[in-house]
Image (spheres, coloured by chain):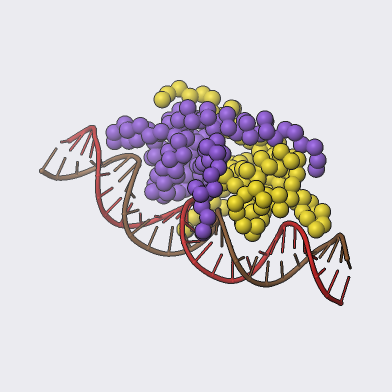
Chain colours: A purple, B yellow, C brown, D red
Amino acid sequence: MRNTTQQIGFTEETEVLAKFSKALGHPTRLIILKHLSNQSCCYTGDLVDVLPLAQSTISQHLKELKEAGLIDGEVNPPKIRYCINQKNWEKAKALFSTLFQEDFKNFSCC
Amino acid sequence: MRNTTQQIGFTEETEVLAKFSKALGHPTRLIILKHLSNQSCCYTGDLVDVLPLAQSTISQHLKELKEAGLIDGEVNPPKIRYCINQKNWEKAKALFSTLFQEDFKNFSCC
DNA sequence: ATTGTCAATCGCAAATATACGATTAATATT
DNA sequence: AATATTAATCGTATATTTGCGATTGACAAT
């Protein structure tokens, strides 16, 4: 790979929306988010019981959601309590809303 | 990799939303979609002029958007005219709307 | 201090994604 | 028929993602 996304210079908005989308781009992570919302918060162990995946795999998905900013991990020894990051969740909601409503509603063909 | 997404058995809705999200999960593809909406439709060549990427790379991104069902390619020799697939775009809009509104509004902590 | 519990991280393997240049395929024009 | 134009596809290299088991780290409870 000779060219990188970094070198192209997309807008901040585009980068952030792509980051959120990518994080949402796996069924397991969608299920995790759904679970977080249903239970308000939950622990890794809860998810391990529900999903047919190894604990390490789930931990990795949680890490990606955390790095994308969609969830937070709050230490609650010996467990870690995960919650949706409301601020960024709202931001994601706003970005997707813009994507689907404002800029894309003026079709004239097809 | 011993376990595959296929084997787990997510709901159709979850799979489709993940597929759409994944397709949106790259800045270049977001720019392409933006361009498609601004111009109603456009050709690969238009995108090659705008993006600092090789023609083959852009063609590959178009292929992924097409496979995700977000765009259509209509032969218009010797060019191919790309347009947003409105039906699936509406579906994506609805799925994201559900994701952000219905199931995720009852937070009680954090 | 030792033990038990929970979750992150490491190390590895396999699959996918990203990017490019070169080639091929399709079709219009000459 | 020959040429030009446009975009897909092929082949390749590299990076990232996904998954697992094993280990480590953090902390509570004993």
- Please name the residue shown 63% across and 43% down the image: B31
Depth order, front residue of B52/B92: B52
**How far across and down, in percent of the image, does residue B96 sit?**
61, 34
Q: Residue at x 65, y 57 (%)?
A: B55
Horizontal side of C20 relative to A77 (left or right) equals right
Q: Tell me, yes or no, if residue A80 can be seen here.
A: yes
Q: Is residue B110 left or right of residue A2?
A: left
Q: Quadrant where the C terminus of chain B lies?
A: top left
Judging depth in this view, the residue of B93 and B3 nearest the camera is B93
Q: Nearer the viewer, residue B23 or A42?
A: B23
Q: Which residue is pictured at 43% across the width and 31% down the height?
A: A83
Percent across and percent down for residue A47 are 43, 40
Residue A69, quarter of picture? top left
The percent position of residue D2, horizontal first and vertical second, equals 83, 75
Up the image or down, B38 lies above or below D17; here it is above
Residue B103, picture quadrant: top right
Query: Left or right of B108: which side holds B33?
Result: right
In the figure, B33 relative to B63: above or below? Answer: above
In x, y percent, where is residue B77? Answer: 82, 57
Q: Nearer the viewer, residue B69 or B37?
A: B37
Hey, which quadrant is residue C3 in on the image? top left
Whether residue B18 is visible, yes or no, is no
Q: How many marks?
A: 0
Q: Residue at 71% of width from left, 46% of height from top?
A: B71
